[in-house]
Image (cartoon, rainbow, N blue to C red):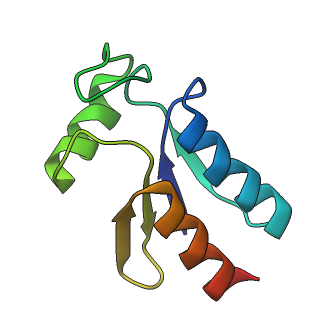
Amino acid sequence: MLELYQSEGCPHCAKVRETLSELGVSYVAHNPRLPGDVGGDVTNEVTHDELTAAGDDQIPYLVDSDRGVAMYESDDIVEYLEEHYA
C-alpha cells in the first residue's frame, strides 16, 4: 500500500500526486498540515504525529509498505514511482 503525506496546496506534493495519477496507482493521502516550510499549521494531529514519528516534518513523504520503503523529496519520489510502478 502506498501512503502519501502531503498538502493540497503544496506544488511539490502536486507533482507526486500527478505522477501517481498518470501511473494509475492507488494510494492513501494524508494531510497532516498546511503547506510551507517545516512548521506549517497542523490540520490533523494523528497524521502529523505519524509524519514526525517517521523523522522530519517534511512533505511530501511517501511510504510504500509493500516494499518497506519510505522517502522524502518529490523528485526522488517521482523517480521511485516511475521505476517501480510504470
Position of residue 55 measured from the top left corner of the image (x, y, whole percent): 16, 53
Q: Which residue lies most toward the front here?
A: 75
State the quadrant of the N terminus: bottom right
- Residue drawn 54% across and 77% down? 80
Residue visible at 52% across and 62% down in the picture: 75
Q: How many marks?
A: 0
Residue 81: % across, % down: 62, 74
* Quadrant of the image occupied by residue 13: top right
Figure quadrant of residue 26: bottom right
| Viewer-nearest residue: 22 or 11 | 11
Task: Identify which residue, 51 or 15, lies in the foreground.
Answer: 15
Question: Looking at the picture, does residue 2 appear above or below residue 86?
Answer: above
**Residue 79: horizontal and vertical position, in percent?**
58, 75
Residue in the picture at 25% in, 44% down:
50
Whether residue 66 is situated above or below residue 25 in the rendered picture: below
Instruction: Name the side, left or right, on which 55 lies relative to 34.
Output: left
Image quadrant occupied by the C terminus: bottom right
Q: In the figure, residue 35 lies in which quadrant?
A: top left
Please determine whether, in this image, residue 71 is positioned above or below residue 14. Answer: below
Question: In this rendering, would 44 be left or right of 57?
Answer: right
Q: Position of residue 24 (x, y in %)?
A: 83, 66
What residue do we see at 62% from left, 53% from top? 16
